[in-house]
Amino acid sequence: MIKRFAGYYKPFIALFAADMLAALALAACDLFYPIITRRMIKVYIPEGMLAKLLVWAAVLLGLYLVKMGLNYFVSYYGHVMGVGMQADMRRNVFDHLQTLPLTYFDNNKTGTIMSRIINDLMDISELAHHGPEDIFISFVLLIGSFVIMSTIYLPLTLIVFASLPAMIVFAALKRKKMSEAFTEARVQIGEVNAGLENSISGIRVSRAYTNERFESGQFEEGNTRFVRARRRAYQAMGEFHAGTTFISDFLQVVMYVAGGLFFFYDKIDIADFTAFILYIGIFLNPVRRIISFVEQYQNGMTGFRRFCEIMDTSPEADTQGAVDIEKVRGNIEFCGVSFSYDDGKQVLHNISFEVEAGKTLALVGPSGGGKTTICHLIPRFYEISGGAVKVDGQDIRKFTRASLRRKIGIVAQDVFLFNATIYDNIAYGRPDATREEVEEAARLANIDEFIESLPEGYDTIVGERGIKLSGGQKQRVSIARVFLKNPPILILDEATSALDTATEIAIQKSLEQLSRGRTTIVVAHRLTTVRRADEILVVTDEGIVERGTHDELLERGGLYSSLWRGAAIR
């Protein structure tokens, strides 16, 4: 884990080296100050050497000015390095998230993922900057002060440094408890973030049902769990701080008593005793740094461990030897396809059907039969358990996922628009498209007149998830996006089920135009939207129970006929 963390220093190795050199110079300044002070008390003041006293006072002032510059460099450029490493990690984890299978996002909350990318990486960047610097300065100060103090009076030096093993043992004993406590706190803040994201996204639903108190209660439960977890973390940290502080305070008492006795028995003089008092402060400073580092290390490495959990999640992988799919006619075939989700529940079993290129296939039937799952298997969002899905007679596993998905357009019931302009949302279908092509796609989707009627036209911000647009307007933007993509295969998954009848009729005309000349798979509950399909499959949890044209299925008087009569009654 440490080696992996250290790898992120590589792009900043020059800045890291400069930061360490500045830290070394700072430690040297701190070690030099008591030497000058001892010399002043021991020689210059008793012997009345005023000139030398003033010279060395000036030297001290110069050292403090140098320290000021070094502190600025370490504080500023050290943090710049930490933020740079944080940005690299955030870029890596974001890029990796783009490659993860949909099952990962099915099983992990958005707010929890966001917490790992934002909160955890903030603590990692602080550790990246302060950790090596604190350890390095502490090491230099401890070794340097030991050597210098030993030259003054070794027995007193050994007494002072005898406390170090006790501190090390105590820190090691408390480290595990702190690690477990901080990890739990991380988990709980992720849950709080997930709850926040969920509640804020659903604010209109909670207002509609006047469930503000319920939402507050839900939030308070998560918030209370976080407080409990954080309290345990602070308890472990408090025990660590209290114990190490007591050891360092006890050390000062020992130092004063032992130093006083050595002075009383003429083993050291007042100048030596003063130097020891100054060095005890220097000795305690790295000890405090180490105490601070332990807390910072637990925070940072806990966050880094959670970061690595995402990075170690296996991405979607193309089959070995997969090639890009080039020209696509659009023939789709399911050959004995079976599929189960991670929980083991089988959704599809031995499903077989074929859609000829340029034809329209409709999937209808009760909820839970696997219609949407069939749609998700064509772009290979999920891996099948058995059988094969073929495009133009070739198993889709022979093709790279990216090239396959470029040939497929999807219009879903739950339209997702980015919090950007209408132009940007349409252009998302093909980012390299010209403005003329984007406007032509809007015209084909019959939304160009509406866009041009807006004060800012195509530059109108649609709001989060397109909240500033109506359902029909959002759907037309998504249709324009697919027009721009111009794929040979089209999937319409409940594309109009959330719209009112008048809007549905208008949107249906755009969808019919979009489907022209493309292989189209339509999932619909409103059977009026699929009556013109070349073939209709009735799908239930038992599989495909009926297939045929609209008229053929009505004549048979089976489930489709029953669903049609029910729709007519409604």
Image: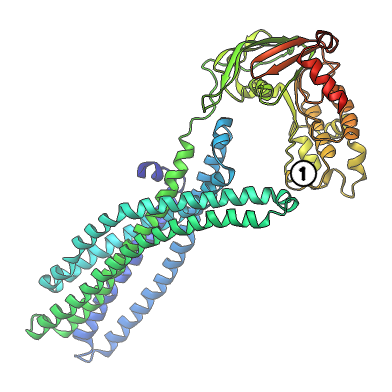
The x and y percentages for residue 238 are 35, 65
The one nearer the camera, 540 or 184, is 540
- Give above or below for 299 relative to 256: above
The one nearer the camera, 569 or 249, is 569
The one nearer the camera, 2 or 310, is 310
- Give above or below for 442 relative to 223: above
The x and y percentages for residue 363 are 74, 19
Specify whether residue 155 is in view.
Answer: yes
User: Which quadrant is home to the N terminus?
Assistant: top left
User: Which quadrant is home to the C terminus?
Assistant: top right
Give the labeled residue for mark 1. Answer: 466
- Give above or below for 128 relative to 369: below
Q: Quadrant of residue 475?
A: top right
Q: Quadrant of residue 68?
A: bottom left
The x and y percentages for residue 487 are 76, 22
The residue under the point 41% across, 74% down is 65
